[in-house]
Amino acid sequence: MKVQLIETNGYKDCIEISNQDTRMVLEPSCGGRILYFDHKGVNLLYIDPDEDAYLLEDGKPPKSKLSPCAGRCDIGPEMTTPSHPELWLGRWTATILDSGTVEMISPEDTETGVQLSRFFSLDQHLTKLKFTQVIKNISPDLKKYHHWSRTFCTGGGIAIAPINTDGRFPEGFLTYGPGDIINYRPGPETNILCKDGLLQITGATSTQKFALDLSEGWLAYLSRESRLLVKKFPIYNGRVYGEMASNNASFWYKGEDICEVEPIGPVEFLEPGEEASFTETWYAMEYDYPGNIPLDAGKIRKIIEILAM
């Protein structure tokens, strides 16, 4: 395991953690995110080339830049949470805790009344990341927020999710759009396949956002570079989920450029001084990109079973 401070993509004070097959770069200057999650030299995260080196001389990002790329994370609900540029774009404080673990802490945010902490721990040998976000209420009032992961993956690949056959959504998923419409019975599309218990989105679709009602706590994304990203996370049956469709996960597409992979936590009802955490575990591995041929659901599920051991 190797840990070092580096400058990359125009950002100073980045922390690089690496093992034999993995390179992870954490970036505290703009929102406390992951810039690189590499497996054998292939970054699974999307980096906007126009964003490189856009920091101003005072070290602060321009407030008009509202969508940092790569391994972003946030709090929701999406439609009702106050704007929070200090959390989304602000400079976080990063501390190396040990050879594989880093803590990043946000500024205190008066708009939302919370402060966020993030812990990143890379396995010594595997391409495996344990990522925990902590929401702390620093206000004198009750606060209601939830974990919202907003990871940008390189576009053109295949988004994969287990279909909840006992779920609330007739087709296994909802779509958002056009406009403010939430469509609970979306029609068939060439790039959307539901087969053998898996949803597979193979490219750009007529709408950008897909809401999921998962009973199994995982999402996956297969890139054109034949790298499979798997995110595992807890599902809390019986608890309140705060998004418009009460979904616990989403995918968001921007054409062939980006696929956003979004685990969502339940609403946390935080009294003053209280905090709550949510943990995702990321894995990356080689897996042949099949082109226009559907993925073998049995093979994907076998990988998920092995990762659960």
Image (spheres, rainbow, N blue to C red):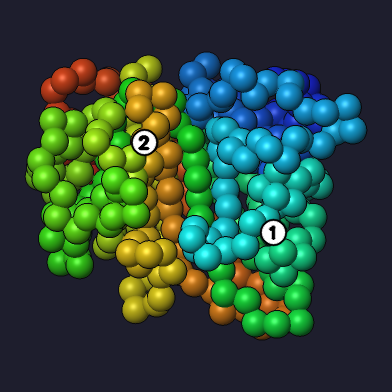
Mark linked to residue 300: none
Q: Position of residue 255 (x, y in %)?
A: 35, 27
- 2 vs 1, front mark: 2
Q: Residue at x 85, y 33 (%)?
A: 59
Q: Position of residue 164 (x, y in %)?
A: 19, 59
Residue ID for mark 2: 253
Mark linked to residue 116: 1
Relative to residue 266, is residue 8 depicted above or below? above
Q: Residue at x 57, y 42 (%)?
A: 72
Mark 1 neighbour class, 10 Å CA radius: few under 14, some 14 to 19, many 20 or more: many
Relative to residue 120, is residue 148 depicted above or below? below
User: Which of the image's four quarters has the N terminus?
Assistant: top right
Q: Residue furthest front?
A: 179
Relative to residue 219, is residue 241 depicted above or below? below
- In this orientation, does residue 232 appear? no
Question: Left or right: 293 with respect to 13?
Answer: left
Question: Left or right: 42 with respect to 179?
Answer: right
For label 2, the SS is strand
How many numbered callouts? 2
For label 1, the SS is strand
Q: Nearer the viewer, residue 53 or 41?
A: 53
**What's the distance in space between the residues labelled 2 and 1, CA to CA?**
27 Å
Q: Residue at x 76, y 72 (%)?
A: 138
Given the image, on which type of amino acid does mark 2 rest?
Answer: Tyr
- In this orientation, does residue 292 appear? yes
Given the image, on which type of amino acid does mark 1 rest?
Answer: Leu
